[in-house]
Image (cartoon, rainbow, N blue to C red):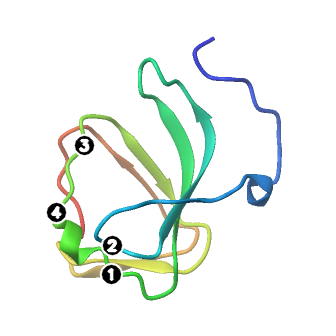
């Protein structure tokens, strides 16, 4: 098994880690990770008012699954607001954001 098995837990009990970089206000709670392959399951948190536009349009070489737990995110590429309880599944190579 490449990542540990995790039975139901409250994600808020996982210690948040600040994500360093040009954008302030981003943190993550890593649920499970395979360091060898790079697979990662995490909760990404944006502090209220966080502006990720300095990071530009994003493209990944992996699938990204998104569920907005609370608040909302405004996608500038689509000029649309996405709100809590909305989901997305982005394939590798899909451009999105900021």
* Image quadrant where residue 12 sits: bottom right
The residue indicated by pointer 1 is: 51
- Of pointers 1 and 4, the one earlier in the residue sequence: 1
Q: Residues within 10 Å of mark 1 (few under 14, many from 20)?
A: some
**In terms of secondary structure, where does tag 4 sit?**
loop
The disc at residue 23 is 2
- Mark 2 closeness class: few <14, some 14–19, many ≥20 residues within 10 Å: few
Q: Is residue 35 left or right of residue 63?
A: right
Q: Residue at x 22, y 60 (%)?
A: 96
Label located before the other in sequence (2 or 4): 2
Percent of width and height locating residue 70 = 61, 75
Q: Nearer the viewer, residue 41 or 88?
A: 41
Q: Between label 1 and label 4, give the one nearer the viewer.
A: 1
* Numbered disc 2: secondary structure: loop
Label 3, label 2: how many angstroms apart (C-alpha)?
18 Å
Q: Position of residue 84 (x, y in %)?
A: 56, 74
Q: Residue at x 46, y 76 (%)?
A: 25
What's the CA distance linking mark 1 and mark 2?
7 Å
């Amino acid at each position: 098994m490449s990542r540990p098995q995790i039975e139901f837990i409250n994600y808020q009990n996982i210690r948040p880690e600040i994500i360093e970089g040009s954008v302030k206000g981003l943190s993550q709670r890593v649920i499970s990770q395979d360091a060898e392959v790079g697979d990662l399951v995490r909760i990404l948190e944006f502090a209220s008012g966080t502006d990720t536009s300095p990071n530009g349009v994003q493209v990944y070489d992996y699938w990204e699954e998104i569920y907005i737990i609370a608040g909302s995110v405004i996608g500038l590429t689509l000029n649309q607001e996405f709100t809590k309880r909305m989901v997305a599944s982005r394939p590798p190579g899909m451009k999105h954001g900021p």
